[in-house]
Image (tube, rainbow, N blue to C red):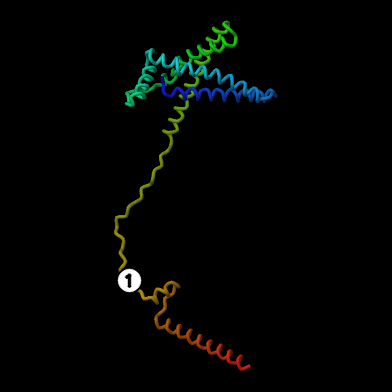
Amino acid sequence: MDPSAPQTVAKGVLITSTVCGLTAGLYGVVKSQPPGPLLLFSALNSGIASATFFSIREYLVGPVLVLSMPGKQYEQRRQRLEEAADGAPTNVSRLTWGDIRSRKVLDSSISGALAGSILNTWKRGRSGTVPGLATGAVMCGLFQWAFNEFDILRITHVSRVVHTQPVPVTPAVPVSTYSLPVAAPESPKSLTDRILAMFGRRISDEEYLNRVKAQRDDHLRRIEQLERERDEKRET
């Protein structure tokens, strides 16, 4: 049995119930009928039918066909089961479009016939066995074939996008072959030079000394003036 059978059954039931339920709900909205009961009723019935179909296909029909049927499709599935069981890679032949189109069509037709006969017999009695068998086989086979065709379209679209996607080309950066000129080492600057260079203008040491003396004289005159004003206030 395929190890992914439980996931396949759950996925099939979920998708079928969702699609059928939403379709019935939209039909109720269009026909001005309450969509809730239609949605629930359709989702429940389709869930039962899809659970019966997928369970028969994945747990009964599929394993029997894989073990007994000849052909490339079933040979590949046997090899995949052996690979999953042993953990060692096997030489699986390459799939063709015909292999993808016929994938599980026979499985779905037989499973649909069994599920249709069971469900129709349960609903209508023994008179519904043959109609359910025929309808289930035809409908499930067609649905599986349509699903395979959609898978082919998806593969071709992805392949076309991957092969036509432009690859970004990084332009080559020319590498210069000439050597850069090496600047001669400068003599170390004094602290005064570095401070003045921060203000964007360099002056000589003599000019800087004169400025500092002028500022000192201004401060001394200001101090004398403040002391004089303080003494006058004390005398008054």
Assign the C terminus to one quadrant of the image: bottom right
Q: Quadrant of residue 81?
A: top left
Residue 165 lies, with reference to residue 37, above or below; the image says below
Residue 112 lies, with reference to residue 224, above or below; the image says above
Assign the N terminus to one quadrant of the image: top left
Residue at left offset 53%, top offset 15%: 139
Q: Position of residue 3 (x, y in %)?
A: 41, 23
Q: Position of residue 47 (x, y in %)?
A: 56, 21
Instruction: Identify the secondary structure beneath mark 1.
Output: loop
Q: Amino acid at mark 1?
A: Glu
Residue at left offset 36%, top offset 76%: 190
Compared across the picture, whether 205 is left or right of 145 comes to: left
Compared across the picture, whether 65 is left or right of 135 comes to: left
Q: Name the outermost residue toward the bottom.
A: 235
Q: Could you say which is closer to the camera, residue 170 or residue 108? A: 108
Residue at left offset 53%, top offset 22%: 13
Q: Name the outermost residue toward the top.
A: 127
Q: Position of residue 43 (x, y in %)?
A: 59, 22
All told, the count of numbered labels is: 1
Residue 188 lies, with reference to residue 136, above or below; the image says below
Residue at left offset 31%, top offset 69%: 185
Q: Quadrant of residue 77?
A: top left
Q: Position of residue 54 (x, y in %)?
A: 49, 19
Residue 175 lies, with reference to residue 190, above or below; the image says above
- The residue under label 1 is 186
**Circle 1 crowding by C-alpha within 10 Å: few under 14, some 14–19, many from 20:** few
